[in-house]
Image (spheres, coloured by chain):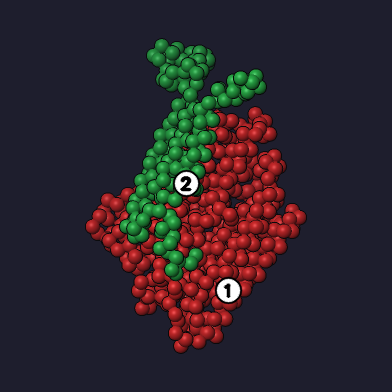
Amino acid sequence: MEPALASFLQEQIVPKFNYWVYVVLMMIGLYAMIAKNNLIKKLIGMSIFQTAIILFYVSVGAKDGAGIPILDHHTYEHALEHPGDEHIDRDGYANPLPHVLMLTAIVVGVSTLGLALAIAQRIFTSFGSIEEDEILEKLQPGGHD
Amino acid sequence: MIEFFGFLAHQAPLVTVLAPAFGALLVTLFGRGKAEAGLPLALISLSLSSVGAVVTLFHVLASGGELRYRLGGWAPPFGIEYRIDALAALTAAAVVLVGLVNAVFSKTRVAAEAGEKAPFFYTLYLFLLAGLCGIVFTNDAFNLYVLIEITSLTSYALIAMGNRRAALSSFNYVIMGTVGASLYLLGVGYLYIKTGTLNIDGMRAAMAEAGIWGDASITVAFILILVGLWTKMAFFPLHGWMPNAYSYAPTAVGTLMAPLMTKVMVYVMLRVMLFAFGADFSYGGAGCGDIVVALSTVAIVAGSLLALARSDIKKMLTYLIVAEVGYMVGGAWVGNEAGLTGAAYHILSDAAMTFCLFMAVSIIVLRTGDHRLTAFTGLFRKMPLTMIGFTVGALSMIGLPPTCGFFSKWYLVGGGIEAGRWDYVVALLFSSLVNAVIFFRIFERAYFGEMDEPAPAGDDADSRPSQPLERVPWSMLVPLFLAAAAVLLVGLFNNTLAGWLRAALAI
């Protein structure tokens, strides 16, 4: 392998692997939303897009070798007895906040998807199709914009 | 007793947000099977919310600065905080008052258009308003995201309650709205990485302390958040979802969302620019002020021309909103006090005049059964009262004193001249000119048009009401007059309002 490429992989790709994945997933989702003709495929793209952002946030909170962010009994007692003492090793705990935020974001994503599927169903019952070009064709007579 | 009132005044912001939210829950709880239960509950909770908003406004003005309210007593950065200045209090008051008046206006239409689904309609309606008030008050970037999504989800559903075209435009809105909100969320994620907080003031403080204004990630976050918000506010060329969604939506939804959604998003943009990033970064470090003013110039010109080309009345109005959004974004970005004041003042004045025009046009389309400009033929004799309301709104759109449209243009043009952005100034004047052409064309038809001329019904079956109204009820006319009065009052008291807004935006 070329040394330049190797060092690029080493420095840019490998340590930031999950961030690259989130960007790629996001682009896949965006492509599906814009380019797909089928309404359900658009929604699949939308879900991938939202999930990519969840991956981003979860990556932010994760740390190498960190455990769950719960203080064990001993550390807790120690912290109570010595308030000023910076005994707690921050690197030992994952950051829980981004993960908690994503619980909310997942709920938002699920409700958006559910609502969008219900709307797609309504479109299907009134137009008899979920292909965008067929629907637009049906609107053509008088369907000025 | 006095202590009790003091307590109530202190809790007023929370009442403003939670009254509609609890009202929504009650409507779902008691409304099942009883279609008529929705409206009284909606009116009661919106009245409570209006009282809360007005008390909050007085409280903020009396304190002379800003009000901070900690939810559950938790201090930031761990708790969520409301931060209410004069702009926030005025915007919230505009939101709930428009919601309340529109609930009265749409009384008969909801019964006719939503039928047995009326309780669900009111549930969504109230949640939408609760979300909008929350957006205006909150000082937490992630809370803001959740509230934006609450308002978006409810508005997708409300729009989809219309006909088949409404469902289709709602679907497009879901796709674009989700992209917008996701970009915002991504931007907030970048900011969280850099600052370690989600509190909007805390972000600015942390960035100032660390001196990381020049970082690429901060610029990326800024751009992501702005593009997300622009999608939500239908800033040209990201406006694609808006015209169809607002014109095919049920009557009550169009009149509610057209005045509120885009304006609240402009408010959020001001908030993010001035308080999350700070004026120094937004106008200096980010280095995109010139481009954004140029974009808003394009938005104004394009919106006006597209409006001129429409023969469908509601769609014409939605394209005028596209132009108005350009006014506000441009005013916010010229980077001086006059422009900012104009943008903030235009949030209020555009809410009033769009509300007025949308109500008048809804009445006209329903009464004549025609959704095109031909509906106006001879209307000054046939429907003089509705046309009074329409005329006030139209004159404000054109920008004639003493309507509020004149004063917002006055401030915005002043800001443009001060900044030397002549393209923006010319675009504003051009838009006034186009609006004058559009509305005087309508006035001419309404004054001199022959009434006997058989009005051909529109060619777009989805835009026509299935059954024209026999007569216009007072429950529709009185709200129209209230909105027209608001257009004039916001104009007459422009000096006072602008003074409060200037104080709120000076940081």
Give the residue displayed 43% in from the left and 68% down from the top. Answer: A141
Chain coloured green in this rendering: A
Question: Residue B33: x percent and y percent?
Answer: 23, 57
Give the residue displayed 37% in from the left and 75% down from the top. Answer: B469
Q: Which quarter of the rendered picture does the C terminus of chain B lie within?
A: top right
**In the rendered view, does B418 fall on the left or right side of B505?**
right
Instruction: Give the residue type at disc 1.
Output: Phe
Question: Residue A140: x percent and y percent?
Answer: 44, 65
Question: Residue B288: x percent and y percent?
Answer: 68, 45
In the depicted view, which residue is nearer to us: B471 or B67?
Answer: B471
Tell me the chain of label 2: A
In the depicted view, which residue is nearer to us: B57 or A57?
Answer: A57
Query: Which is in the foreground here, disc 1 or disc 2?
Result: 2
Report the disc number at residue B379: none
Residue B485 visible somewhere in the drawing: no
Give the residue displayed 44% in from the left and 69% down from the top. Answer: A142
Compared to A50, does B502 lie above or below?
Answer: below
Which residue bears the numbered disc 1?
B439
**Category of crowding for the residue at label 2, using alpha-carbon neighbours closer than 10 angstroms: few (below 14), some (14–19), many (at least 20):** many
Question: Residue B79: x percent and y percent?
Answer: 47, 34
The residue lying furthest to the left in this view is B33
Chain coloured red in this rendering: B
Which residue bears the numbered disc 2?
A33
